[in-house]
Image (tube, rainbow, N blue to C red):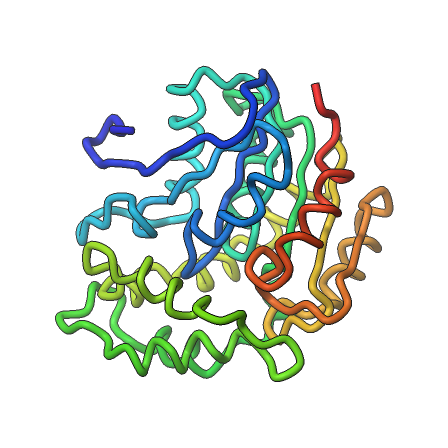
Amino acid sequence: MRLEDGRELHVRRVGPPSDLPVVVVHGFPGSSADWEAVAPLLERDTILFDLPGYGRSDKSRDASYSLFDQANVVEEMLRKLGVTRCSLLAHDMGNTVTAELASRHNSGRLGFAIEGIVLTNGSIFIDLAQLTRGQRLTLRLPNRPSLFSLPTWVMRRSLMESFTKEAPPPAGAVDELIAQTRLGGGERLMPVLIRYIEERRVHQEHWTAGFVEYDGPLTLVWGELDPIAVLPMTERMKQLRPATRVVTMPGVGHWPSIEAPALLAEHLRTALLPTA
């Protein structure tokens, strides 16, 4: 799909067509490829796409990758697809893009209706996040595209920090994450893309309100062994918004869609209501 600013957005649809699709908003530094094993199991009309800067989408060096702009992209994509209502399913950074969309929904400024939200592991409360060494080091780099390509071993070591010994990556998972990042020289954008963490800190109150004030069903499906987006985040959300449904996944870490796609899909088939 070509956006109004000329950038190309990688979009594909899985499952039977309907007027209530599930829109999957991936995280950092992942892509829609993280959800390839889950989407068919949902047996639902599911929209997979790569946000600009990620996966197979445009990776312009001079574009804005603010989370507000990424939310604008989701709105434009769904408008072009003719989607007027949907459920949002998000992970990691995608949770915050979803929080911005929920805020717009709450104030009547969104171009589509959000019928339900499901969040998987992500730093919905940045003050509780346990950033990895790789994330902290990347945040220290200048806020501009790197002139040099990151060595594969550096990328691998950083990504491995998002897994644990108790919840290790499946065979080939880290290689696929690296491959999707490297498409179009995307690894050089990492110092820019990771600024979403700083943006999250600045706008924490705004994005927390986006979820707390949302009037539809909100479900958290969380890997219990996440070393970054730790389990207490779900407890805080439950305190702030008692109507929130929380489902935890023992033995699963930060990447439920990669680590346990079948189990995740089982939970999502219940959480992603209504179905029509």
The answer to which image quadrant residue 159 occupies is bottom left
Q: Residue at x 30, y 51 (%)?
A: 53
- Quarter the C terminus occupies: top right
The answer to which image quadrant residue 261 occupies is bottom right
x then y, percent, for residue 188: 22, 65
Q: Look at the picture and state if 68 lies above or below 186.
A: above
x then y, percent, for residue 260: 64, 60
- Quarter the N terminus occupies: top left
x then y, percent, for residue 253: 64, 69
Q: Residue at x 48, y 49 (%)?
A: 26
Q: Look at the picture and state if 6 lies above or below 111.
A: below
Q: Residue at x 67, y 81 (%)?
A: 166
Which of 198 and 61 lies nearest the eye of the viewer?
A: 61
x then y, percent, for residue 237: 76, 54
Q: Is residue 243 left or right of residue 221?
A: right
Q: Residue at x 47, y 78 (%)?
A: 160
The answer to which image quadrant residue 130 occupies is bottom right
Q: Look at the picture and state if 203 lies above or below 17.
A: below
Q: Look at the picture and state if 27 lies above or below 103.
A: below
Furthest residue toward left: 147
Q: How many marks?
A: 0
